[in-house]
Image: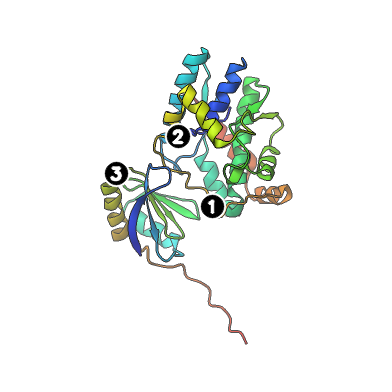
Amino acid sequence: MYRALRLCSHGGGFEAIPDPPQDLDLGRIRASLEAAGVAVVDARVLLIASLEPEVTISRSGRLLFKTGDEAAARRALRRLLEIAPLDAPRRRRASSPTG
Amino acid sequence: MLMSGGIDSPVALHYLLRQGHEMLAAHLDNRPFTDDSPLEKIVDHLRLLRERYGQPIPLYVLPHGPTQIALMRGTDRHFGCVLCRRFMWRSAERIAEREGASFLATGEALGQVASQTLSNMRSATASVRLPVVRPLIGFDKAEIEAVAKEIGTYAISTRPGVCCQAVPDRPATRSDLVQILREEERVDVEQILDDCLRRSVVL
């Protein structure tokens, strides 16, 4: 799902963009992180996880690592993927049959 | 003067100081949606401008991250940038009124980013009563950068940083004030502003 890390547009962090875009269940991710002892800011449409370095997790699956050090960003990505189900989509209501 | 750490605001401040205005600076601190770099840049911008103009230019740092969280939780993300700006203006106005300032100022120029369309500027500043001064309104980016290099702030502004993570995927570039006011009814404006002002610090 994540193929590359690249410097963000302002050059102060690394970002990972999933291909294809996801629709993540941020509630489950938050629960997994907190169960692992990671403090999380939940802004409903994104999470900010206090890993080393801090990571922003968007519902689309975009990740931003607040460091200019690529190796540190890779370590945080590995740690995040160990802890949290980033491939778990949100549960949707079953749609009623049509036609 | 609203200071962001970018290229424009120190240039706008330079013009107002050059005209002899006594200025205060305010920074809406977007952490945890950014890193420490905007605040560090502003501290360095002000060091240069204080030396150049011999003015103290106090810097008010207002925590804006909790405001962003309240807006993300309670309002339509599409209008995030305009709503964010409305709260920035309101917070700055409260400081200005407390300090007896007669106007608000910003480094905005037309058409540079999503929040700087004419309709978004109008919707944003409809939240305040004090006049808003925009010394760079008709400047293009190259002109602003040239002045920033001349006064020494450009190298500070262009240091690496993390861009604002609170910007929605598709921010509104045109905003209808009625729609914006309806969105704003979904959050407690006074409570958000009181919290922000209570936790402000002066550097």
**Quarter assignment of residue A1:** bottom left
Disc 1/disc 3 C-alpha distance (Å):
26 Å
Share a chain, discs 2 and 3? no
Which secondary structure, mark 3? loop
Position of B83 compared to B34: left or right?
Answer: right
Would you name the residue on which mark 1 appears?
A: B168
Numbered mark located on residue A69 in the image = 3
Label 2: chain letter: B
The x and y percentages for residue B88 are: 59, 36
Q: Which residue is drawn at 64% across and 51% down?
A: B186
The x and y percentages for residue A91 are: 47, 70
Q: Residue at x 65, y 25 (%)?
A: B97
Query: Going by the picture, which residue comes out furthest to the bottom?
Result: A99
- Residue B27, can we see it? no
Which secondary structure, mark 1? loop
Q: How is the image coloured?
A: rainbow
In this view, B64 is above or below A98: above
Disc 2/disc 1 C-alpha distance (Å):
20 Å
Numbered mark located on residue B38 in the image = 2
Amino acid type of the residue tagged 2 in the rendering:
Pro
Amino acid type of the residue tagged 3 in the rendering:
Asp
Q: Are marks 2 and 3 in contact (CB under 8 Å)?
A: no
How would you rate the neighbour count of disc 1 (Cα within 10 Å): few for under 14, some for 14-19, many for 20 or more?
A: some
